[in-house]
Image (cartoon, rainbow, N blue to C red):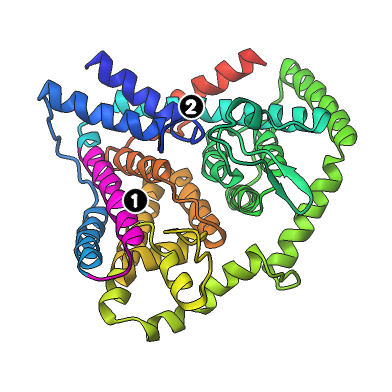
Amino acid sequence: MSKTKSFLIGLIGMISSWAIIRFGSNSLFKILVICFLLVNLVELNIKFRKVNLNPWFYLMYGSMIITFLLSNSMTIGAEWIKQENVQFFWMTVYATFYLMASAFSDKQIEIYFKGFVYGNLIQMVWVIVQYMIYTVTGLDINMQLFSTLYSRSYIKEGGFGASGLAWHPSNLAVLLVILFWVFDSWYWKFIVLVTAILSNNSTVIICVVTCIAINILADKKGGVRSIKVERRAFVIAFIAIFVMLIFFIKTDLFLIAGNRISFIYHRLFGGYYDGGSTNAHIRYYVTIPDVITHYPLTKILFGFGEGCSGYVMTNLFGQYSNSGAWALECDIVNILWNKGLVGFFLFYGWLFSIIKRGWAVNHKYAYIMIAIIVGGIFYNIQYDWVIVLEMIINIAIYKQIDLFNTNHFSKRIVRDCTDLA
C-alpha cells in the first residue's frame, strides 16, 4: 500500500469540510483530490477491483454529459455557461476519484473515514471556541485569521452563528450528522446538539434533531438498553455539564436555543414568512409548475447545468440579477434545475440505494442519508466534499465494511477522545 496515497486519502478526509482553507478560488480539498488523481496516474498502478460502484451515480453522470452538451449549445449567457463548464469539470474529477476509490483496500476506507471524523472533531472544537471568543470580545476569529477569504460573519435573527472552518454554518450540517452517529454516548450527542445550536442555523439544527428523533425511535423499537456508567465517566460528565451550565447562563444560550426552536417551528408551519430567506426558499418550491410550463422539454428533462439552477429565478423573477451565475440554496430544487428531472431522479436514486443497501450493513448508514436528505429540503448542503463522502460510504457498503461497528475503529476514536478528556 503506497504510503503517499494513504497519507493523501487520510488528509483528504480530514480537511474535506474545512472549506475556508483555500488557494485562490479552489479549496484545499479540491486541490488534494487532484493531487491524489495525479499520484495514481504517475504510479500507473490503478487496479479496479470487482466492486459494484452502484450504477445510479454513473447513469446520473451520463445525464450530466447530455446537460453539459445542451447547455453549451444554447444561449443562456456566457457567465452561466462558464459556471456549468467549471462545475462539470469538477464533477468529472469526482467521478474519476469514485472510480479510483473503488480500488481502496478496507484499510484505506478506514483511513479516509478516520481522518474525516478527526477533522470534524476539530471543526466542532473550532465552533465552540469561535462562539466563546465572539461572546466575550465581539470578534469573529475567522474574520481575524481569514479576512481575505472570509467575507463576513454570519449574523441571523440578531444572533451570531459560529460557522467553524467555513464561511457559512450550513457546512456543519453533514459533519455533525456523522459525528452524532459515530458516538453511541449521549454525552457526545449532547455536545453535537450544543454545537448545532451555536451555529444559529436552522438547517444544521434540523439535521441534528432528525438524528435525535431517529435515535429515540430506534431505541424504543429495540427496547430500553441498560446503561453502565463508570465512576470516572460519571465524574467527567458531571464536571462537563456543570461547566456547560455556567457557560449557558453567562452567554444566554438557553434563550438563544429557545428562540431558535421557536423560529424553526414558525418557519416550518407558516407562522414566519418574511421577504428574505424564508420567502425565497418557499418560492423555489411553489414556482416549479411555472418553470415546467415556461421552458422547453429538454431543459426540464436535463436541466440548466451544474451550478446554474438560479438561472430560472433570475430569468423569471429577476432574483439576484446582478450576482452573476448562482445556485438555489435548497438541495431539492437546486438539483432538480441543475440536472433536470432525469438527473434528479438518478441522483436521489443513488442516495436511496445507499439507504437500502446500507441498512443491511449497519442501520446508521441509512440514518445518516435520511438526515442529509431531510436537511436538503431546507438548504443546499450537497457540497462537493459531501458528494465524495457519499461515494466513500457507498463503496464501504458494497465492501460490507461497517465503519460504525462498536468493535471497529470508531471504538478507538471514542477511546482516544475519552483519554483526551
Residue 104 visible in the shown view: no
Q: Residue at x 53, y 62 (%)?
A: 377
Q: Is residue 390 left or right of residue 313?
A: left
Residues 322 and 354: in front is 322
Is 5 situated left or right of 177 in this image? Answer: left
- Residue 81 in the image: state x and y as whole percent: 30, 60
Element type at marker 2? helix
Q: Nearer the viewer, residue 349 or 301?
A: 301
Q: Is mark 1 in CB contact (under 8 Å) with mark 2?
A: no
Q: Is residue 90 magenta?
A: yes
Identity, as a three-letter code, of the amino acid under mark 2: Ser
Q: Label 1, label 2: how many angstroms apart (C-alpha)?
A: 21 Å
- Residue 207 horizontal/vertical position (percent): 59, 51
The residue where tag 2 is placed is 410
> Residue drawn at (50%, 49%), measured in percent from left and top?
367
Quickly name the residue at label 1. 357
The number of callouts visible is 2
Q: Amino acid at mark 1?
A: Arg
Residue 291 place in picture, x, y as percent: 42, 80
What stretch of residues is rendered in magenta? 74-99
**In magenta stretch: residue 406:** no
- Above or below — where is 293 with respect to 377? below
